Image: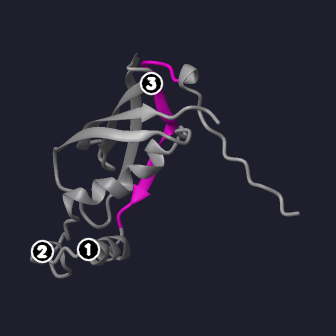
């Protein structure tokens, strides 16, 4: 009989308001290959994001990729729902940038028998400049 791989979920009660994670922040290096793959996957044919520009900018929505490692630090149990998000793009990201993202738990609350978590995510480039910031709210799943 094959062994089952157990996924570790973070219980709602263990999420602490004010906690910042991961430590150190999640690091992401923006490469030509990542930008090309993203453009291909999304069907984005914006000329400004194609090869040729120096420095070559990345699409702002690449944030959905470079923030994943930071957001994945705490595993939402099954049944969790990504309910809303808002992002601000403070400055462009370029191929060759090293980005660091961290998340801070802003708030947790219960409403209509569901547990909610609001998190702020902040990403800075290698010079410490703010690149992207945003707030994501999730309904936290119930532990199996």
x and y percentages locating residue 127 in the rendered image: 29, 47
Position of residue 62 measured from the top left corner of the image (x, y, whole percent): 28, 60
Residue named by callout 2: 46
Q: Looking at the picture, does residue 87 appear above or below residue 39?
A: above
Q: Residue at x 16, y 82 (%)?
A: 52
Q: Quadrant of residue 10?
A: top right
- Measure how far apart labels 3 and 1 are at the Cα level: 35 Å
**Does 92 appear above or below 14?**
below
Dots 2 and 1: beta carbons under 8 Å? yes
Please name the residue that numbered disc 1 is placed on. 39
**Residue placed most toward the observer, 76 or 112:** 112
* Of the image marks 2 and 3, the number of the one nearer the N terminus: 2
- Disc on the earlier residue, 2 or 1: 1
Q: Secondary structure at mark 3?
A: strand
| Quarter where residue 120 is shown | top left
Distance from Cα at disc 2 to Cα at disc 3: 40 Å
Q: Quadrant of the C terminus?
A: top right
Give the crowd class for mark 2: few <14, some 14-19, many >=20 residues within 10 Å: few
Residue 40 screen position, x and y as percent: 29, 78
Residue identifier under label 3: 115
Q: Residues within 10 Å of mark 3 (few under 14, many from 20)?
A: some
Magenta residues, as a range?
Answer: 15-30
Q: Secondary structure at mark 2?
A: loop
């Amino acid at each position: 009989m094959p062994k089952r791989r157990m996924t570790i979920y973070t219980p709602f009660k263990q999420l602490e308001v004010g906690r910042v994670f991961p430590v150190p922040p999640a690091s992401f290096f923006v490469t030509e290959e990542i930008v090309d793959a993203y453009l291909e996957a999304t069907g984005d044919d914006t000329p400004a994001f194609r090869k040729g520009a120096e420095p070559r900018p990345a699409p702002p929505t690449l944030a959905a990729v470079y923030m994943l490692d930071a957001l994945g630090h705490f595993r939402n149990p099954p049944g969790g729902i990504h309910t809303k998000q808002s992002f601000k793009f403070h400055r462009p990201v370029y191929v060759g940038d090293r980005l660091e993202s961290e998340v801070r738990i802003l708030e947790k609350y219960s409403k209509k028998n569901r547990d909610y978590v609001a998190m702020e995510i902040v990403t800075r480039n290698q010079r410490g400049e703010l690149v992207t910031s945003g707030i994501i709210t999730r309904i936290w799943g119930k532990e199996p």
